[in-house]
Image (cartoon, rainbow, N blue to C red):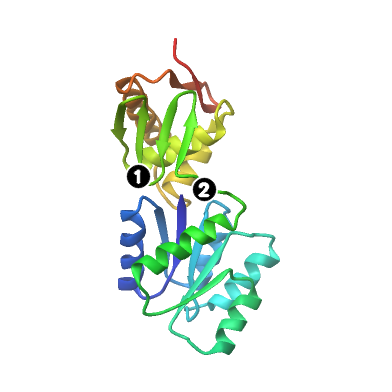
Amino acid sequence: MRILIVEDEKRLAGTLADILNAHKYLTDISYDGESGLYNALSGIYDAIILDVMLPKLNGFEVVKRLRREGNHTPVLMLTSKTEVADKVTGLDSGSDYYLTKPFETDELLACVRSLVRRQGEILPDEIGYRGVILSLSTCTLRCEERSVSLSSREFEIMRLLMVNGENIISKETLLLKVWGYESEADDNYVEVYISFLRKKLAHIRAGVTIETVRKVGYHLGIRD
């Protein structure tokens, strides 16, 4: 899952990214409200962590504009402003949760999990497809007694493929969801990671593989 961090304190933004990356979330960082709003409007994020006191555009205004544009990505407002009135303003602006600094890592992660659930997506610990199981907590792929670990990008690609099953996912969608809106990654990156995943599926002797639909994208299919 991809999360946008909008935080002008670069050290804190880096710490947030490190925490989330360590738990297999993919992250992008914006250091001011204007660029944060622009990136958020791309619609590729599963959640947004948004500071209040930002250059160019404050967090309250960012979330107001997001909601006005019909973007309903869950927003966690993260700020040192602890007054009740500020919390009320943040929630009334359209944010989903308000967390004050300093915070505990476990509390932050619990908030992020809660935000994702609020999208209406009930997150099981495992996703299954034709005998192949993807563990969301351990980022492993298994078939019967055989298993293999996945990197964060392998995991996210496999998650998207398994959720969609036989439905085709375009390369453009994979690039946006896995590498991010501002990444310079191209189609070759997707092809390389698809190759890695095919080898890992073969390693665990899965009955499925990743099929290419030329000039369109990829989907899961039954291995010959």
Q: Judge whether 203 appears above or below 84 on screen.
A: above
34, 211: nearer the viewer: 211
Give the CA distance from mark 1 to mark 2. 17 Å
Of marks 1 and 2, the one in the foreground: 2
133, 213: nearer the viewer: 133
Q: Judge whether 128 appears above or below 61 on screen.
A: above
Q: Judge whether 24 appears above or below 197 on screen.
A: below
Residue in the picture at 61% in, 83% down:
88
Residue in the picture at 29% in, 32% down:
148
Residue farthest top in this picture:
224
Using residue 70 as the reference point, say whether residue 153 is left or right of it. Answer: left
Q: Which mark is residue 123?
A: 2
- Residue 80 location (% of width, % of height): 43, 84
Q: Are marks 1 and 2 in contact (CB under 8 Å)?
A: no
- Residue 123 location (% of width, % of height): 52, 48
Quarter holding the C terminus is top left
Residue farthest front in this picture:
145
